[in-house]
Amino acid sequence: MVVDACRPDYLSPYANIVAGTADARTPAIESLADEGTVLRRAISAAPRTLPSVTSMLTGLRPAEHGATSRQFAMRYGETVTRQLSESGYECVHLSPKTWTGDWLPQG
């Protein structure tokens, strides 16, 4: 699951780390964190959603995959979603953005 543009001090797993307070109440995300991995020092591949998410799904840097803006679709790279789909998993992409399906092969 990828969630974009959330302030960490508003999410339970990070509030104490970032803001030094346990005031944030996000029980569903806290439950996911309890059962999974919480990354405390993650660094984005780029300052924008499109190249960052493409890098997460391909393992490539933005200069390598080419999806750096809406005008530039991914030119190279296999996505983890395509590999999972070919192995029988069902992958879902949900976004309010109408253009997101054009830049990345869905798999």
Image: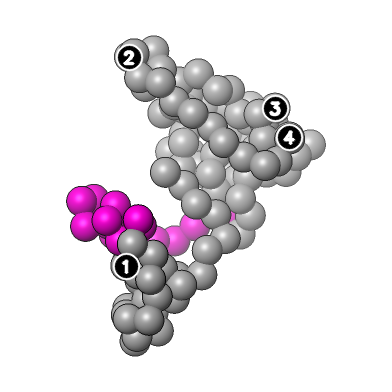
Secondary structure at numbered mark 2? loop
Asked whether, in this view, residue 107 is left or right of residue 12, the answer is right
Q: Which residue is mark 2?
A: 87
Of the residues tagged 1 and 2, which is closer to the observer? 1
Question: Can residue 83 be seen?
Answer: no
* Outermost residue toward the left in this view: 35
Of the residues tagged 3 and 1, which is closer to the observer? 1
Distance from disc 2 to disc 3, alpha carbons, whole Å, reads 23 Å
Of the residues tagged 4 and 1, which is closer to the observer? 1
Quarter assignment of residue 54: top right
- Residue 69 location (% of width, % of height): 72, 43
Q: In the image, what residue type sits under mark 3? A: Asp
Q: Which residue is mark 1?
A: 13
Q: Which residue is mark 3?
A: 102
Distance from disc 4 to disc 1, alpha carbons, whole Å, reads 31 Å
Check the picture and name the quadrant holding the N terminus. top left
Asked whether, in this view, residue 15 is left or right of residue 82, the answer is left
Q: Which residue is mark 4?
A: 99
Alpha-carbon neighbours of circle 4 within 10 Å: few (<14), some, or many (≥20)?
few
Start-end of magenta stretch? 28-46
Distance from disc 1 to disc 2, alpha carbons, whole Å, reads 32 Å
Mark 4 touches mark 3? (CB < 8 Å): yes
Mark 3 touches mark 1? (CB < 8 Å): no
